[in-house]
Image (cartoon, rainbow, N blue to C red):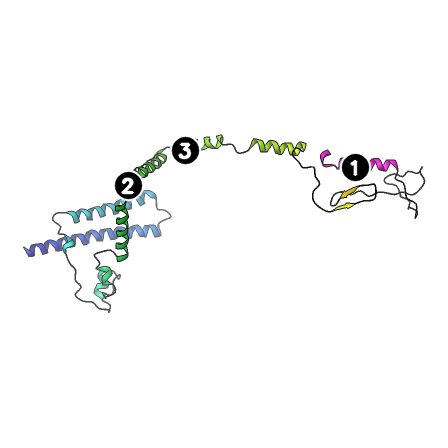
Amino acid sequence: MQQREERQLEASVESLISRVSHVKNALHSFIFKLENEYERLAWPSVLDNFALLSGQLNTINKLLRNEKTPSFRNQVIIPLLLSPDRDEDLAKLTEQRVPVFSHEIVPDYLRTKPDPEVEEQEKQLSTEAARIGPEVAQKQIQTLNKLCSNLLEKLNNPREDRDGESAGMRQNKPSFNPADTNALVGAVAFGKGLSKCRPPGPVTTGHPGQGPMMSGGPTLQQVTLGGGSGQQAGMGGPVAPQQQGQPGKMPSSIKTNIKSASASMHPYNR
């Protein structure tokens, strides 16, 4: 009886090793394609590799769940020899992944439970899940299902429908404010809403009788011409020097030109 169980265990282990070797070879081939043939690798080929790996893993699960397969959970592995020296046979069996079977690596390779940190996190999650009542959990499940359904519906809709909806939203949504546009046109064309006060800045005063003049803007200087009252000079003609102590008089033609220039330079007449 005991010998039959041992033979059955050995056969199960050999079959499991063979299946795992197939999975390892498939993984090596897939990784090689991803690293060296990624430029010409097509998506259907990637899906085929995933399907192959998925089928091999399902085969291993069926093998472990088979009634004839002994329960590996009841088997205990005890290390008979631990050594810090390199073991060539062990390195060859593990393809150079485990060259030494020492006290440092044995707890990791022969571990049958998760790490203590992982176990603590699992306990915390289990405690939090137990605190949530059935009604709250059901509401959260319904909300999650609703979000997933909406997302699947949007993904399953044709692309043309989504493009049409987005185009309609762009057309219906105004991209400007009519009131702001009218205010801007009125301010530029008719000066509506503009302040008539002078801008801040130093103000320089001219000669008596001329009034203040803004600094930084166009300035006009009074032109004094010498000569009698009947003498007039053109704008481009020579100007006679003014005699000391006698104020000159500005001809009427020059006054008219200055007034017309000032009127044309006013901001509301531009």
Confirm whether the magenta stretch covers residue 261.
yes
Neighbor class of circle 1 (other Cα within 10 Å; few <14, some 14-19, many 20+) is few
Nearer the observer: mark 3 or 2; the answer is 2
Residue 164 in the image: x percent, y percent? 43, 31
Placement of 185 over or under 113, stated as above or below: above
Residue 150 in the image: x percent, y percent? 35, 35
Question: How far is the residue under mark 3 from the one under mark 2?
Answer: 34 Å
Q: Nearer the viewer, residue 228 or 110?
A: 228
**Residues drawn in magenta:** 246-270
Name the residue that disc number 3 marks. 162
Nearer the observer: mark 3 or 1; the answer is 1
Mark 1: secondary structure:
helix
Name the residue that disc number 2 marks. 137
Give the quadrant of residue 165. Answer: top left
Nearer the observer: mark 1 or 2; the answer is 2
Q: Main secondary structure of the magenta part?
A: helix
For badge 3, the amino acid type reads Arg
Image quarter hosting the C terminus: top right
Placement of 2 over or under 239, stated as above or below: below
Question: How far is the residue under mark 3 from the one under mark 1?
Answer: 63 Å
Residue 113 in the image: x percent, y percent? 22, 56
The dot on residue 97 is none
Q: Earlier in the sequence, mark 1 or mark 2?
A: 2
Neighbor class of circle 2 (other Cα within 10 Å; few <14, some 14-19, many 20+) is few
The dot on residue 261 is 1
Mark 3: secondary structure:
helix
- Say left or right for 244 vs 23: right
Question: How far is the residue under mark 1 from the one under mark 2?
Answer: 84 Å
- Say left or right for 138 vs 181: left
For badge 1, the amino acid type reads Ala
